[in-house]
Every structure is written in C-alpha cells, then in structure tokens.
Amino acid sequence: MAASEPLVVLEALAGHRSAPSLVTPDATDWPGVADPEVLRAQLVDWLGQYANAGTRRTYAYALGLPIAWVDAIGGAPTREAGRGAPPPAQAGPLHDLAWFRWCARQTLDPRDATARHVKAWLHALDAAGAQRRTRQRMLSTLSALYGHLAETGVVAANPAALNRARLGLSSTARDASPTVRLTAEQLKALLVAAARLPYSRSPRLARLYALRAVAMVALLTLGLRISEVVGLDRGDLYRSGGDDVLRVLGKGGLHREVYVTDLVRDALTAYLTERDRVRDAAVPARRGRTGAGDAPMLATREEGRCSRVDLYTLLRRIAAQAGPALDGVADRVHPHALRHAYVTIALEQDARIQHVQADVGHATIATTQHYDRGRRTRASTAADLVAAAIAAAPAPSS
C-alpha cells in the first residue's frame, strides 16, 4: 500500500463526512494506530480464513472495513470482467457506528480495546436504534475477530467475550424475525412476474434476461443464501446418485449438496440454453474451447458474475410488478425472504425439521452435522415439497 493510502483507508473507515474532523491534513495513519500496515495485515489474515467471498464481505462491511481489502484476498479481482464494480450500498443509520469507525472516532487502537469499550459501543448502537438482533449479530462478528486475534497473540484476551445474558443479548433473547413471511402463492407470483417484465428493447436480450430472472427466483426457492446463488458456477450442477444436485459453497467454506427440483432444473436449462445460443451467435467459437463448467451460473451480458446488489435490485423490481399477490409486502421482499419462505413452507408441508436444516445449511444446529453426503438421499430433502406447494398454488390474477 502506498504511503498516502492509509489516509484513504481511514476515510473509508470513518466515513467521508466525518473524516476531516478526525485527521489533520498531513495525517498518514488511523487515529490512535501507530502501525496501520500491521493492523491491516492482521485483519486480512483473519478474513482470509473464510473461503466464501460473500462471508468475507459481510464481516468486513459489518465492521466498517474497506471492501476492497477482502476482494483482493487470494488474488480475487476487484472488478468484474468488462464492467465496473457494483455500486456500494447506501449508508444505513448505523453506518458510522461500525466498530472500526467507532474506534477511529475515539482515537482508539482496536487492539487496545477492552470490555469497557465494547460495552460503550453496544450502548451507542442501542441509543442509535439498533435492534437486539442487530446488536447480537454485530457482537458475534466482533467476538469472532478478537477470538482470532487472541489465538494469534495479537491481543491478550477477547474483549467481546461478554456475558450476553446481562446485556440482554443471550441466544434465547430473540425478537420476532422482521423478515416478511411469503406464501407459496406469492413465490409463484414472483416467478410469473420475472418472466413477464420487459428487460430490453432487443427481443433477443429481453428473452435472455427474462429467463435469467426466472432462474434467479427459482434458485432462491431452494432456500439458498444470495451469496451462495452468486457464487454458483455451471459446473456446480451435476448428477449424483441418479439425481440432479447443486454443489453449494456455504458459510465457513463448507460445501453441501442441494437437490434440484423440476422447477429449478427447467428454469436453469432454459436460461443456459438461451445464454449459449446468444453468446455463440455474438462471439465466434474458438477452436478447442473447453466446457463452461467454471463460468458463473448467473452471468452478466459480458459473462461476468452477477453481484448480490444486481440480484437484490432485480428481485425488488420483480416484486414491485408481481401484482395483487404482493400488495403491501413488495417493498419488503429481499433474497433472504425467499430463504425464510423455504423453511416455513417446508415445515407447513410437514417436512422433518432435520431435513430442512440440512437443506439450508444451518451450521449452528447440531443435528445438521449428521447429514453428510453419505447419508443424504432424495427422501431427506424438503425441496420437492416446496416445489409442489408452489406448483399447486393458484396462479396470480392479472
């Protein structure tokens, strides 16, 4: 990193509006940090443990770290081929209270933080309106960071290892989920709207983008995380034990097999067939060209990987045009709502909870550990029950 870059990094950490009040014009490091390069390397070392790029991005964003750091881990490109990086998400009300921005405002080296500092930070979050679930999640992320720093000898102890019950943040103290509960009928309305929306003035591209939108919604009906969807490659779809499955990279760098329903298989087949047809018509085939197994499952026009921002925006657009079935909830539809719907619909259809936990990769459920590849069968997935419920739901009214 160049000598002047720490100041740029500090601005990214502290936020452009407040950065001038935190540093002097000739400052070249973070407030309170004498060795910013060392701190950066320690943080990158922690994030580098996570194989899933989406996990690294989520943790970095939650702590207030520059996303460019994590995108560079492992030599990953910071820009998709042929296009700029996706635009950053709009700063939320807690943007300036991310841990590293808060430390910068206190002129505190994060490695010198104590339990007293962490409690003060949690109180600031509470005063700013952060819900209990949000504070639980942010404290868990911070504890994971400091657990690593303690293990590697950077800090003497984990200041975020607090008594959560006393703070009202114990695992049993959970608010009701704010995620909208979607029905099978509403999922069908999303699929129909995805196919009908106008996407381009070019008939050829309009059909391609419509099929991509349907494929995206279909994949989300499997209960996948949005980071798992964007991380899929074409080679992740294959046959195993006589069934079509997706090899999904989940949290913690763990892979799991997700059984593909007829709904998803048909959507992917239609999309990938049209995509190959459009691409081959536009680009002359190269001699000796290998298969497209390592190409993204959902691709941009330039065959780059779609970002989470791309798909989130697309899903919101679809929901807004989904008709009466989504009235009153369209502005609350997001990728996690479809994952939530998978679980709730599956349980409503009397699926075994252990099967559902294994389907969606809930690593925090102890019983999920018993459902490894050797024991998973078509009968131990709720995917077909969810697909059948969607198929049986009445078609949305025009």
Image: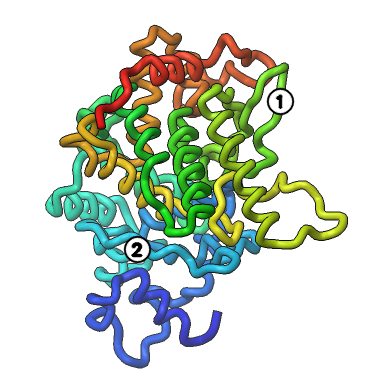
User: Residue at (35%, 29%) from the top-left corner?
Assistant: 187
Is residue 46 in view from this perspective?
no
Is residue 173 in view from this perspective?
yes
Q: Write down the residue under mark 1.
A: 239
Q: CA distance from mark 2 to mark 1?
A: 45 Å
In the displayed structure, 125 sits above or below 359; it is: below
Tell how many labels.
Answer: 2
| Image quarter of residue 27 | bottom left
Please tell me whether mark 2 sits on a helix, a strand or a loop.
Answer: helix
Q: Write down the residue under mark 2.
A: 100
| 311 relative to 184 in the view: left or right | right
User: Residue at (22%, 50%) from the top-left corner?
Assistant: 122
User: Residue at (53%, 68%) from the top-left corner?
Assistant: 83
**Which quadrant does the N terminus fall into?**
bottom right
Q: Residues within 10 Å of mark 1 (few under 14, many from 20)?
A: few
The kind of residue on which mark 1 rests is: Arg
Disc nearer the start of the sequence (2/1): 2
Q: Which mark is residue 204?
A: none
| Image quarter of residue 193 | top left
| 149 relative to 136 in the view: left or right | right
Q: Position of residue 270 (x, y in %)?
A: 58, 37
Q: Residues within 10 Å of mark 2 (few under 14, many from 20)?
A: many
User: Residue at (60%, 65%) from the top-left corner?
Assistant: 81
